Image: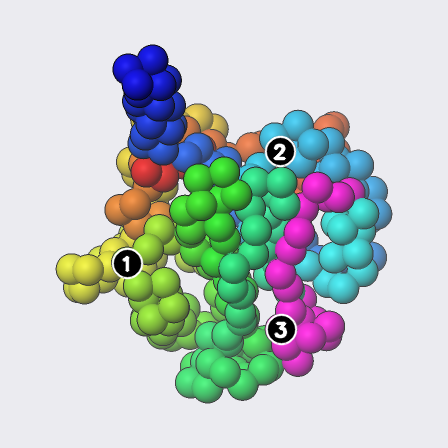
Amino acid sequence: MKTLLIPILMAVFLISACTKQPTTIEVISFNIRLDHAGDGINQWKHRIPLVQNYLEEKQPAIIGMQEVLPKQLNDLKNIMKDYDFVAAGREDGRNTGEACPVFFDKKRFSLKNSGHFWLSETPDKAGSMSWGTHYPRIVSWVELTNKEKRNTLFFFNTHFSHISEEARIKSAKMLLKEIKRIAGEKPVILTGDFNTPAESGPYNTIINSADETFSLINAEEIAETKSNGNITYNAFDPGYEGTRIDFIFVNKEFGVKKHTVDEIKEDSLFISDHYPVRATLQMQ
């Protein structure tokens, strides 16, 4: 009996030890820039190899993208064969207009739930707009299950208005409300092009939630190591002086090992008019 008991106890100990190890997740927020003929050398068709090389090198677990037109979504599907995704066009909730897709490593995660809503006074109405914005603004989200550890997380991805400050502030308030409604107190990651810098009204709305049960923090602020990046939007201009408007936010369920802005370009060819933002997260 003792000879059987010892291996059983050892197996239980090893399973317990593995279960307690944090889950490491590399995530990226990346505005890929819509396909526009006026971009010349930096038009999408020229940037695809740079995007592919970057994604193959970094192999993120999850990536939230912005400004993805239907043809670009097809291109991404072809170069990201190890990923599944959730996406909807912002104009109709199907295939029209820019999308904010979430891609995830299908070997690591399975899709438990997903959805979309609009940053407007009628969030369930596809293509709806409010507060002086010029285009519909969509949020795409997924609930993912880690296939190895069976724990789950929520990932939200969006793109705020580039015109209306009122829209950005009210979008931030509505976004927090919807995230809490959908995810509760479970692990949450939020990525996006927020078209606003740190310390602005919309940014402060996101990180200064008065709700004690739910709050988000810029992953960079709690990262153990940080590198690169005074700006995320570069305007395809090597001398552009801007700021960071793309962020990764997390709730208290995550620690952050590393945060970086990946300034990817080859000569005059930029990966996008936004540099990707990348963080290595740890979820207990």
Label of residue 185 in the image: 1
Front residue of 195/97: it is 97
Report the amino acid beneath label 2.
Answer: Gln
* Residue 15 colored in magenta in the image: no
Report the amino acid beneath label 1.
Answer: Glu
Look at the numbered discs 3 and 1 and tell me whether their residues touch, using CB distance below 8 Å: no
Q: Residue at x 42, y 85 (%)?
A: 121
Q: Which residue is mark 2?
A: 59
* Residue 96 colored in magenta in the image: yes
Q: Which residue is mark 3?
A: 90
Report the amino acid beneath label 3.
Answer: Arg
In the rendered image, is residue 184 in sight?
yes
User: What's the CA distance linking mark 2 and mark 3?
Assistant: 27 Å
Local secondary structure at mark 1: loop
Vertical placement of 283 versus 207: above or below?
above
**Location of the N terminus (image quadrant):** top left
